[in-house]
Amino acid sequence: MNQTLFTTLKQLYTIRKVPIGDYARIDKNGFQYRIHVYQIEGIGRLSLISTKALLGMMKMETLILSPYEKDAPIFSMDKISVSGVQDTFLAEFYDTRLQETDLSALARVGEKYEDVASYTPESRWYDSIRLPESVYKRGKKMAETYEIMAEEYLMAYIQVLNEAPECDPAAKTAKEKAYARGLIENGGPAIDQLKKNLGETGSAELFEKYLF
């Protein structure tokens, strides 16, 4: 998923890699993380994370777009595969906007795939800023469908970015850093495991300094 999406983004934007030191490659407690962080000119921060566990039986790809130069929500997308068990797809949008903007492009993708089996995520501290355009899908042998959905959600989000106004980067960054701090302090499905492997200090630096 990530390589395809990154190729699309490179065709549309000027992108430069952000050095993140030892965080680029983490191998601990049976988990392997490969993390790449980029700056997208005129947009903000892009992070691509590949995770493997259970001797490679569990594979997870994550894309995070933190657009502090455009008044658009944070976009976080995951595709998770557990060999022989099930596939999971999440496209989440967190409201760090400074004002209301048009998100109808995201809603249209959700409507297109509303018949694809969904699940209800457990309640979390960030429910109040998780936008209704977020989707949660799960099923067997769904990897190919989820790849297509990932591409369509990225294109819809790019449309949102194109239509979103420029904003005060300092004010927008403050809201996005607050979300990152909230993840560290209050947890989340992925951050909880990462904290076990990196500790709270390392996880805080990774999230607040590099990913957001």
Image: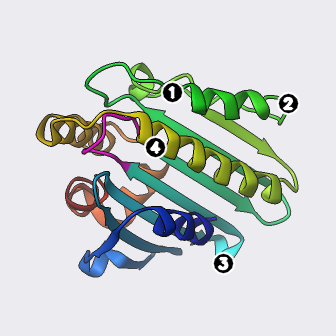
Q: Secondary structure at mark 4?
A: strand
Give the CA distance from mark 1 to mark 2.
Answer: 21 Å
Q: Are marks 4 and 1 in contact (CB under 8 Å)?
A: no
What SS does tag 1 mark? loop
Q: Which residue is mark 1?
A: 103
Q: Looking at the rendered structure, which numbered label has been put on residue 55?
A: 3
Which residue is drawn at the image coordinates 40% and 19% (left, top)? 128
Left/right of residue 115 with respect to residue 187 in the rendered view: right
Dot 2 falls on a residue whose secondary structure is loop
Q: CA distance from mark 3 to mark 1?
A: 39 Å
Distance from disc 4 to disc 1, alpha carbons, whole Å, reads 12 Å
Which region is colored magenta?
A: 66-75
Secondary structure character of the magenta stretch overall = loop
Amino acid type assigned to the residue bearing label 2 in the image: Asp
**Which residue is labeled 2 in the image?**
115
| Residue 13 in the image, given as x and y percentages of width and height | 40, 63
| Above-or-below relation of 115 to 39 | above
- Which mark's residue is nearer the viewer, 4 or 1? 1
Q: Please tell me which residue is depicted at 38% across the width and 59% down the height of the picture.
A: 46
Q: In terms of depth relative to the viewer, which is nearer, 108 or 23?
A: 108
Residue 113: which numbered mark, if any? none
